[in-house]
Image (tube, coloured by chain):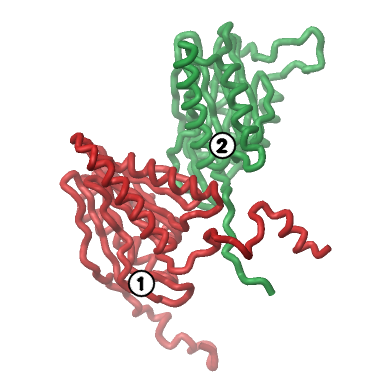
Amino acid sequence: MTKQQANWSPYDNNGGSCVAIAGADYCVVAADTRMSTGYSILTRDYSKICKLADKCVMASSGFQADVKALQKVLAARHLIYQQQHNKQMSCPAMGQLLSNTLYYKRFFPYYSFNVLGGLDSEGKGCVFTYDAVGSYERVGYSSQGSGSTLIMPFLDNQLKSPSPLLLPALDAVTPLSESEAVDLVKTVFASATERDIYTGDKLEIVVLNAEGIRREYIELRKD
Amino acid sequence: MDSNQAAKQHSLVGSEADSQRTLYPYVTGTSVVALKYKDGILMAADMGGSYGSTLRYKSVERLKAVGKHSLLGASGEISDFQEILRYLDELILYDNMWDDGNSFGPKEVHSYLTRVMYNRRNKFDPLWNSLVLGGVKNGQKYLGMVSMIGVNFEDNHVATGFGNHLARPLLRDEWHENLSFEDGVKLLEKCMRVLLYRDRSAINKLQIAKITEEGVTISPPYALKTFWGFSAFENPTVGAEGSW
């Protein structure tokens, strides 16, 4: 009989949900602020959203230590980019960098599920969605994290994304106005909070548009 | 092929037999509980060092001052805690040697500890501790926690181990901004008493530390009053003779 081991896992799931929606001239990125482990809540007030560049915001859920490390790596790389190019990274450029950074650790992954939101070089909203090892796609809207299975179908229903098989390709960004998109995000999180135990406490909404970045907080159910 | 062997051969961590890494903890400390109050941070931990189910050491100091502005409390493997203290000694020494009038505040120490814990986890050789870091610098109170795999956060009150399950709910209910020192101590003692009743590895010998702008004070060890005179505990077998 083999000796009893106190087995530990290098990963943990600290829960939470993230959403991003792209509009014609804005982008909404939102995430809840609950951090959990197992059946316990560690804190009700933890931000999952990180501003990577002037026009680029990332929301990540999963294993918080890996998320933090990923944010640090991207922030450092962005600093270097700014020194070398004398300008901010565009959102699509950051999108590629994030994908490469994730794949770099393909054989000991960052357990981080990300959505990147921002404005592209034309000022239109863009959202990129990722898996843990860097496969990514530009989309009109996306959700990741523990509540994504509850949120994504609802977003599909409300935002009626055109089929990617159509030719010529139709724009995936939503025709909704900024305030309508923010309301949709609030509705979506209220619903996810009801049924996902890891989502709740508070909702942090970040809106990027031509004027800049604005932040909003909404209370969610704390149970 | 034996499926167990197959699993081991494809295991991410390689053969356990020639391992030099931490596999499991030996001498462990139990919960640390801490909260922010009006003037700073209050932190409490008992003085037990358990060797599995044996209570081997009864005078382990699990709360230590770090530099001028921080207080560190640790649960988990005691030897790893001692190693962390050595790392911190070196960190503070180098900070002092700059002699630039600046000194590491609790945020900096917490950040350093997070990096250390995360990097050890990346090497599959963790420091088997949950650390609580509290402090005050320039009037700003700070209280944070790091786990053995690098998960970290800050909040108005934190607890490790069993404290997370038993003390946090009490703190969520009764904590408020600008607690006085007396109220803070009462609340912390309430948490420690519950842990004493319900945590098998807790002992009735604890220290409470406070850190304010003025500095760190760690109380001498003392015991909490407990009450066992419940009628249900008298003649517990009265309804079922022969049982215990």
Residue B41 left/right relative to A97: left
Chain letter, disc 2 residue: A
Residue B152 left/right relative to A8: left
Q: Between residues B9 and A144, which one lies in front from this camera angle?
A: B9
Disc number for residue B203: 1
Q: Between residues B66 and A48, which one lies in front from this camera angle?
A: B66
Residue B136 seen: yes
Question: Which residue appears at 35% of the width and 61% of the height?
Answer: B191
In the figure, the green chain has which letter? A
Question: Which residue appears at 43% of the width and 68% of the height?
Answer: B27
Q: Quadrant of the N terminus of chain B?
A: bottom right
Helix, strand or loop for disc 2: strand
**Residue B14 coordinates in the image, percent (x, y):** 66, 56
Q: Is B185 above or below relative to A153? A: below
Q: Between residues B180 and A95, which one lies in front from this camera angle?
A: A95
Q: Which residue is mark 2?
A: A61
What colour denotes chain B? red
Disc number for residue A163: none
Helix, strand or loop for disc 1: loop
Q: Is B15 above or below relative to A16? A: below
Residue A190 seen: no
**Residue B98 coordinates in the image, percent (x, y):** 23, 37
Type of amino acid under label 1: Ile
Residue farthest to the left, as pictured: B214
